[in-house]
Amino acid sequence: MANQKRDLYEILGISKNATQEEIKAAHRKLVKQYHPDLNKEPGAEEKFKEVQNAYDILSDEKKRQLYDQYGYAGIDPNAAGGFNGAGGFNGNFGDFGEAFGGFGDIFESFFGAGRRSNAERNPNRGPIRGEDEFTSMRISFMDSVRGVEVKVPLTYYKLCSHCNGTGAESAKDVETCPTCRGTGTIKTQTQSFFGTMISEKRCPTCNGTGKRIKTPCHECRGEGYIKVKEQYNLKIPQGINSQRQLKIAGKGKVGKNGGPCGDLYIEIIVEQSNDFKRDGNNVHIEFPITSTDAILGLRCEVPTIYGMTTIDIPSGIQNGDTIRIKNKGFKDVRSDVFGDEIVHIKVVVPSSLSSDEKQLYEQIRNVESRKKDKPNDKYNEKIKRAYKM
C-alpha cells in the first residue's frame, strides 16, 4: 500500500484556520530550521522541500481552498477520481466537459453557467510571472552593527533581450498556429444519443499559445529566457536584525510566455554575541566593578558596539543598577535614529583578601558597627515585629 502523504497543516505546524500571516511565520521558522545550507543532518533537505511544497499550496488561496475541500486530490493534476482531474468537480462545466467528452458544452449551451474564458482554459497564452524564491544567509553580530556588502553567487533566468521573451528570431518569425488558428484550443465533435457533443481542448501544436515560431531566437534557442550566473553585490544595511528579509527583484523563478521572473528573498540570520544582547535597537551589557568602586564611585571605560567610551559610575551604586549611554545602540534601518546601550552593574565581592586588605576592611567594619542604623539590625527588627518573635 502506498505511503500516505502528511497533512500540509501538520507539516507547517499550524491549525486549519491559520491566517496567511501565521502561514508565512511558520514557513520562515521552518525554512531556517531545515535549509540545507544551515542544517546538514540527514533528511533535512527532504523536510525543507516538504515545507516549501506545503507553503506553496497553503499560501495560494485557490490551491488552499481545493486542498481543504478535496485533500491532495484537489491539487494533483494527475489524481484520479475527480471531475476535472484535480480531485473534484469545481462547479465549472468546462472542466466537466473535458473530463466527460463534451458534456460541459451541452450543459453550458442549455444553462449558460460556469463558462470559462479563453484565457482560463489556456493559461499558457498570456505572460505569467515566475514564483518567488526564498533562501537565508548568516552574518556576524558586528556585521549587523556596521552593515556590510557581500558577494552572493546567483543563478537565475532573465528575459532574452533579443526576442523579449517571444522565443522567435524576429517578429516575422511568429505566426498564427495553423492548427487552432490562434485560439489556443481545438474543438472536436462526437455523436451520441444526446446529439452532437462538442469538446474543447488545448491545442497540441502550440500548447495553447495560439502561435508558432518558424525560426527560434539564436540567443535563447527559442526558450525566451537566458540563464545567468553572477556574483551579486548584496548591501546589508547597518542595524539589520535577525530574520529580516532582503528582496532582490527579478532573481526568482523563471516566468512563462514572456512574463517577468519572480523575486528572491534572503532571510538574514545574525549570529549572537556572548557579551552584547540586543533588545530592539537597544543593547545590554553586564559590567563588573569591585565593591569598593560601588561604594566610592569611579570614572572608567566601558565597551560599546562602537568601541570604548568613558562613563561616571556614581558612589553608592547597587548590584543590578543600570546606566544608560545614549545613542550607543543599533541604528534603525529605516531612519538615522540610534538606540541606547544599557550598562548593568555587577558588583563583584572578592573571594580572597590580602592581609593588608583584610586589615582595612576590619577597620571599616569597626566604624560601621558604631552606627545605629545598620541594615541588618533594621531588617531583624522588622521581622521580629511582623512575626512577634
Image (cartoon, rainbow, N blue to C red):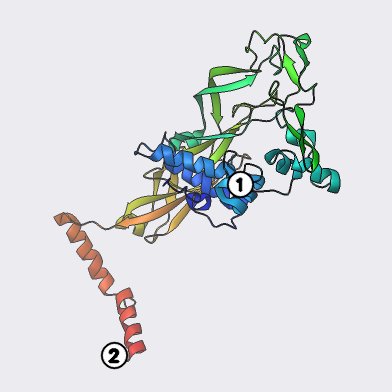
Q: Residue furthest front?
A: 193
Residue 228 visible? The answer is yes
Distance, label 2 to label 1, CA atoms, is: 80 Å
Q: Residues within 10 Å of mark 1 (few under 14, many from 20)?
A: many
The residue that disc 2 covers is 389
What residue sits 70% from the left and 20% below the top? 205
* Residue 266, above or below 151: below
Instruction: Please state if 120 lies on the left or on the right of 79 as rendered.
Output: right
Badge number at residue 308:
none
The outermost residue toward the left is 355
Q: Does 73 sit left or right of 270 as displayed?
A: right
From this view, report whether residue 223 is shown above or below residue 60: above
How many discs mark residues in the rendered view?
A: 2
Q: Nearer the viewer, residue 171 or 272?
A: 171
**Foreground: 312 or 264?**
264
Q: Position of residue 238 (x, y in %)?
A: 54, 35
The image shows residue 193 at horizontal and vertical percentages of 77, 42
Residue at image coords 59%, 55%: 18
Q: Position of residue 3 (x, y in %)?
A: 42, 46
Q: Amino acid at mark 1?
A: Gly
- Residue type, mark 2 in image: Met
Percent x, y of residue 108: 82, 44
Q: Is residue 281 left or right of residue 274?
A: right
Query: Looking at the image, which residue sits at the far bottom?
Result: 388
Q: Secondary structure at mark 2?
A: loop
Provide the residue designation for mark 1: 87
* Residue at 60% across, 42% down: 337
